[in-house]
Amino acid sequence: VSGLVTLTTLGGFFLLFIPGIMLSIWLSLSLYVFFAENRRGTSALVVSWHYVKGYWGGIFWRFLFFGIAVLLISLVLAFVTSGPAILIALKSGVKPELSLFGQLFNLAFNNFLILPLSIIYSYGVYRSLKEIKASVPLESDEQKIKRNITIFSVIGILGLIAMIALAGFLFVKFLPSFTPNIKSPTSFQVPVSSMMDSMAFSPLLDFLSLGK
């Protein structure tokens, strides 16, 4: 389900960004539908779309409000835990670094408070919409939503393939400019005069070695 949501949303972002934002809200409840209603694959995405349909604006503003609140709380806590060190670093022109206590606190805050709150908040939105729209989507609406999901998923796959191909082309094209021009060991040649000198002294070296 997560892969389908990602591909479909990417397909929307490839079409000038705004469709991606709309799809991310329409499909934001797909995982809750998957776990709570045991719907798999495209069916979970269709039900999420059905629940959000007609309430897109309200869901968008609720998620935006929650995100802004979390951001403000995170900034305040980061300033409380590492504010003096950050101010000193900024005044001295050095890149600010969080203290070990600040890093551990932020890690615990994000994983043990923000993440559970996000899940609970989104689940509350899902439960509210499910109670409002208790009926399953009509077959005509379901087919239409499936068609839209398929179209955006194909666009997402084609976009990923195009990005990978472009990255490979740029890598092959510009790699030689970043590779140092190092001569191979076989390209070094010993001067002929040095070879002649070594050949001239070889009998003398043999004589001395025999004398020993």
Image (tube, rainbow, N blue to C red):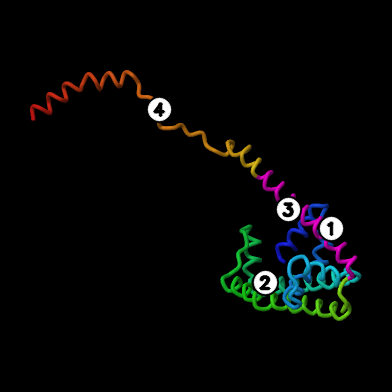
Picture layout, residue 38 above or below residue 156: below
Give the residue number, with chain letter if any, for mark 3.
Answer: 157
Q: Earlier in the sequence, mark 3 or mark 2?
A: 2
In three-dimensional space, the C-alpha distance between marks 3 and 2, rounded to whole angstroms, equals 39 Å
| Label placed on residue 19 | 1
Viewer-nearest of labels 4 and 2? 4
| Residue 111, x across and y down, in percent | 65, 74
Q: Secondary structure at mark 3?
A: helix
Q: Secondary structure at mark 1?
A: helix
Q: Secondary structure at mark 4?
A: loop
Viewer-nearest of labels 4 and 3? 3
Q: Earlier in the sequence, mark 1 or mark 4?
A: 1
Give the residue number, with chain letter if any, for mark 2.
Answer: 78
10 Å crowding of disc 4: few (<14), some (14-19), many (20+) = few
10 Å crowding of disc 1: few (<14), some (14-19), many (20+) = some
| Residue 29, x across and y down, in percent | 78, 71
Quarter the N terminus occupies: bottom right
- Magenta region includes residue 202: no
Q: Residue, x 86% and y 74% (percent of image)?
A: 136
| Residue 11, x across and y down, in percent | 78, 55
| Label placed on residue 188 | 4
